Amino acid sequence: MTAPVLKRRCAVYTRKSTDEGLDMAFNSLDAQREACEAYVASQRGEGWILVDDQYDDGGYSGGSLERPALKRLLDDILAGKVDCVVVYKIDRLTRSLMDFSRLVDLFDKRSVTFVSVTQSFNTTTSMGRLTLNILLSFAQFERELGSERVRDKIAASKRRGLWTGGVVPLGYRTENRKLIVRPDEARIVRIIFERFVILRSITKVLRELDAAGIRQRSGRPFDKVVLHKILRNRTYRGLTVHKTEAYPGQHDAIIDERLWNDAQSINKEPAKKRARETAATDVALLRGLIFGPDGLAMTPHHARRNGRLYRYYVSMAAIKRADNEGLRRVPAGPVDQAVVEQMRRLVRAPEIVARTIRAAGESANKVREALSDFDRIWNELFPMEQARLVRLLVERVDVQDDGVRVRLRTDGLRNVIHELQGPSPLKEAA
């Protein structure tokens, strides 16, 4: 009696590294599948039949297993739906020895055989495995050789100053493998460099860009990472960079040599040093005058959220001790405004004005004239001069749980009158 022929369910897998030509009526994937299906048909007497599903990966490299059709095939093998995998050539399945070893282990565990219709072997024998490994070694060598050729071609193109692809820098567009300057974006790049050289702070440049409504090409606000990349991108000097080498590019520079060198000299300075210099130029109205409920000084601090700048006075205890339970920080705006209002009431109080007249020996008209001008002058002063004026009038500001207490200087008003009447930085700033 003849033994019954067992059915062997065969899955044809096809792959092409690029998507070139896949839109044709008969493409490379069709040719591979046709050859594989013909081979399965020739083995019909052995019980070979095709499964209904097709496993085609067009435009996927053989150097990785991250391919959608291959993942479906492996899932079907694990589900027990496939007994044999048929490919046109072994490198259509994979070009990596390590990946091939993993696949063969999976096939063995699930009793799945593997067939290449143009390379005769059987994975169940040691000789078949040796043949597969030899063929796969050459496939991996060919892939690595191709990668080296691509890298060499990119390096040669870079040496000629050509654009070889990637994210096009802000300020340029591409045309025939060349970078062409976009005037509108180039203006933004120049603004970034010029303001950075003047302000010496990326944070300050970000504030100005936000205030002016200047955005990235994507429409999103700039951030520190993006500005750092722009300020260090040698493409803006008309250079093409490959690894550590730079070559004259076939595109126009956006940033001239002087501006570039100035920006790079600032970039080379230690970040902490520049941060200290920036903090020194950021004027806080009550710096050195404000104290928390515990009697410790409070220091200016700021944070940026969702593109907005928030200024605070932070208790030194909150900085030194994380377990401080007292008042840790207060918003700077309301506190500053409360102190300014106290100053305004001071210069308008009749008893204070009369006392100042007696102490200073000045005529009432001159004193009243100087004090009546206070609001106008205050609004026209630069922040640094406003802070100086506060120090003339205010001795100490105490932040309590129930409000703000301002201690004024006894001779502060007389000093302010002298400042407002005579030639001084306050007068000149006004």
Image (cartoon, rainbow, N blue to C red):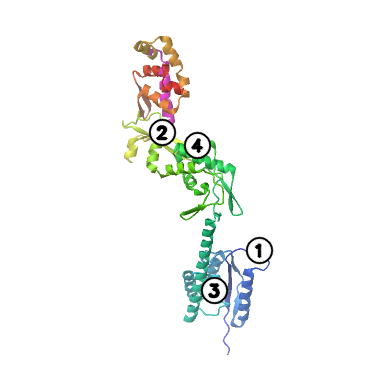
> Looking at the picture, how far across and down is residue 410, in whole percent?
33, 18
- Local SS, label 4: helix
Tag in front: 3 or 2: 2
* Residue marked by disc 1: 23
**Magenta part of the protein: which range?**
332-351
CB contact under 8 Å: marks 4 and 1: no
Q: Given the image, on which type of amino acid does mark 3 rest?
A: Ile
Q: Given the image, on which type of amino acid does mark 4 rest?
A: Glu
For the N terminus, the quadrant is bottom right
Image mark for residue 90: 3
* Residue marked by disc 2: 281
- Residue 132 among those drawn in magenta: no
Q: Residue at x 56, y 49 (%)?
A: 251
> Looking at the picture, how far across and down is residue 38, in whole percent?
63, 77
Mark 2 or mark 1, which has the lower sequence index? Answer: 1
CB contact under 8 Å: marks 4 and 3: no
Given residues 101 and 149, the one toward you in this image is 149
The answer, for residue 125, to whether it is visible in the render is no
| Separation of residues labelled 2 and 1 (CA atoms) | 63 Å
- Local SS, label 2: helix
Image mark for residue 208: 4
Q: Residue at x 51, y 47 (%)?
A: 237
Mark 3 or mark 2, which has the lower sequence index? Answer: 3
Classify 10 Å Cα crowding around label 1: few (below 14), some (14-19), many (20 and above): few
Q: Given the image, on which type of amino acid does mark 2 rest?
A: Thr
- Local SS, label 3: helix
Q: Is residue 203 above or below residue 151?
A: above
Q: Quadrant of residue 89?
A: bottom right
- Local SS, label 1: loop
Given residues 192 and 241, the one toward you in this image is 241
